[in-house]
Amino acid sequence: MARMRGLNEAANNFSDPRHMDAWDHAMNWKIEGVSARGVLAEQYAWAIPSPDALAAIADFARDCGIIEVGAGTGYWAALLRDLGVDVLAYDAFPPGREGVTNPYRHRQSYVPVHHWEDQRASVALEMERTRALMLCWPCYSEDWAWRTLRAYLDVGGQRVIYIGEGEWGCNATEAFFATLRTRFKTPIYAPIPSWPGIHDGVELYERKRR
């Protein structure tokens, strides 16, 4: 993947489980007391992509495209675009947007990240309802991911790509996971490398037929 090769070599190693020496080093790496996870999450993403997980997502959504909400820097979107997937990236705090303070200190984006306005979610999702909805590490205990998922279902959305921890982890809300559990089939699971104490992965959901 050209973008993976083109980014800083050391950071690329952290995002590729084949480079286990660099991966082991990253687990204990600190810069002035700040963990490697925090530094790399600011620059890239909270979840660590792997070639196999990206390939699974690409196979799942290549025919329909993806709308990603909460895209952050757009790093996952950029890697999926490199695999030929049509991805639209949105975030409430797009990096570099004038007048918007990014609470996660994202300073750059790897694809254009459009401003997501919660009050216009249904309009945006109606226009892109044939795309799969992707949510990567939605904030713990905040309900925007659940509201986005409900709006997506309301306009007839069929596929969801969720990247993060499970129902009792540190992402989203109980209502979000209950909606996934009741409205979608058992997901296809794709593992990704995880930081110590983190148990995240990729889950690919298709909506149940009524």
Image (spheres, rainbow, N blue to C red):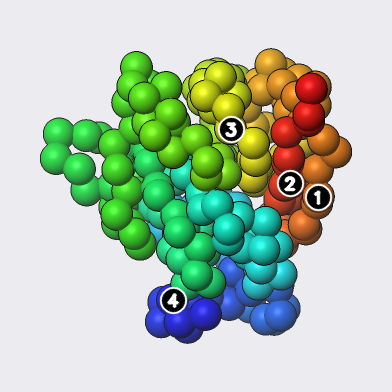
Q: Classify mark 3: residues with Cα within 10 Å, few (<14), some (14-19) or many (20+).
A: many
Q: Classify mark 1: residues with Cα within 10 Å, few (<14), some (14-19) or many (20+).
A: some
Outermost left residue = 98
Residue placed at 67% from the left, 56% from the top? 60
Q: Mark 1 points at which residue?
A: 188
C-beta proximity under 8 Å, tags 4 and 3 = no
Q: Is residue 34 above or below residue 149?
A: below
Q: Classify mark 4: residues with Cα within 10 Å, few (<14), some (14-19) or many (20+).
A: some
Q: Distance between the residues labelled 2 and 1?
A: 6 Å
Q: In terms of sequence position, does the residue under pointer 3 or pointer 1 come before the other?
A: 3
Three-letter code for the amino acid on which mark 2 is drawn: Glu
Residue 208 horizontal side relative to residue 25, left or right: right
Task: Give whichever of 80, 91 is nearer the camera.
Answer: 80
Q: Distance between the residues labelled 3 and 2?
A: 16 Å
Q: Name the residue under label 2.
A: 203
Residue 57 horizontal side relative to residue 66, left or right: right
Three-letter code for the amino acid on which mark 1 is drawn: Ile
- Visible residue check, residue 3: yes
Q: In terms of sequence position, does the residue under pointer 4 or pointer 3 come before the other?
A: 4
Residue placed at 81% from the left, 50% from the top? 188
Three-letter code for the amino acid on which mark 4 is drawn: Arg
